[in-house]
Image: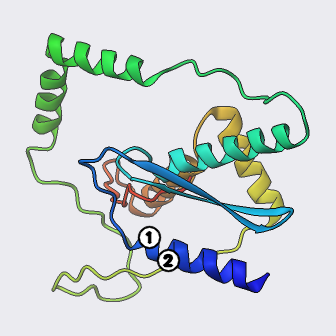
């Protein structure tokens, strides 16, 4: 009913305004709402400290797969994890104990010590001398065949779609500028693919 959906929407809107208290340690919460006798809606709130957009996409895909399998009485077709969080912690500790972090940091700081490269693009206008950090957005529609091909390439090569498209963007900038050193910044939080 419309009342149930309105109740759920209001609950979610209120809950999203309440920050997660890291001192409590409850970084994931979930609520299952019953809308009708045969209709439910699941709401989860996950702190960004434990999952980024890419991880959330994987989690959601696996959740949908598992739910569908359980609903149909089938075994869940997910492969067991080959890498656990404890493995990552162990690797981090070994990097710290051997000093590898310091070596990598020193090498990176030396590489970035000089002036950073400025991208020189061919302009069809006179660039402003005053730096303004304003951007814009360009939305392009790709045909279905191209999209499917990109998905296939990213899956077979083991790259996220984000990494594949970012690589294409670097190649495009290299072609326009004829420069080898190119820096591109992007927000890492909230990345979905």
Label 1: which secondary element: helix
**Residue 178: horizontal and vertical position, in percent?**
39, 56
**Residue 130 in which image quadrant:** bottom left
Q: Would residue 124 be found to the left or right of residue 5 on screen? A: left
Q: Is residue 12 left or right of residue 122?
A: right
Q: Which mark is residue 16?
A: 1
Name which residue lies at 14% across and 16% down.
Answer: 99
> In 3D space, how far apart are the residues under numbered discs 2 and 1 (Cα atoms)?
5 Å
Q: Residue furthest front?
A: 37
Q: What scheme was used to colour the molecule?
A: rainbow
User: In the figure, 7 relative to 30: above or below?
Assistant: below
Residue 88 occupies quadrant:
top left
Disc 2 secondary structure class? helix
Q: Which residue is mark 2?
A: 13
The vertical placement of 130 against 14, above or below, is: below
On screen, residue 134 versus residue 61, left or right, reads left
Give whichever of 47, 92 is nearer the camera: 47
Label 2: few (<14), some or many (≥20) within 10 Å? few
Front residue of 36 and 45 = 36
Q: Residue at x 55, y 80 (%)?
A: 10
> Is the N terminus in the top left, top right, bottom left or bottom right quadrant?
bottom right
Residue under the point 8% across and 44% down: 113
């Amino acid at each position: 009913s419309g009342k149930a959906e309105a109740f759920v929407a209001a609950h979610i809107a209120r809950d999203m305004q309440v920050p997660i208290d890291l001192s409590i340690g409850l970084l994931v919460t979930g609520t299952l709402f019953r809308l009708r006798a045969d209709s439910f809606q699941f709401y989860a709130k996950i702190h960004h400290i434990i999952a980024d957009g890419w991880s959330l996409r994987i989690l959601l895909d696996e959740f949908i797969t598992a739910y569908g399998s359980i609903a149909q009485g089938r075994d869940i077709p997910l492969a067991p994890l080959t890498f656990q969080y404890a493995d990552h912690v162990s690797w981090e500790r070994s990097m710290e104990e051997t000093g590898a972090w310091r070596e990598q940091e020193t090498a990176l700081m030396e590489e970035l010590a000089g002036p950073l490269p400025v991208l020189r693009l061919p302009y069809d206008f006179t660039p402003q001398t005053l730096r303004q950090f304003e951007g814009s957005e360009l939305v392009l529609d790709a045909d279905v065949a191209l999209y499917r091909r990109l998905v296939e390439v990213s899956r077979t090569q083991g790259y996220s779609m984000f990494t594949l498209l970012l690589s294409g963007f670097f190649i495009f900038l290299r072609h326009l500028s004829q420069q080898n050193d190119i820096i591109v910044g992007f927000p890492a939080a909230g990345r979905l693919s």
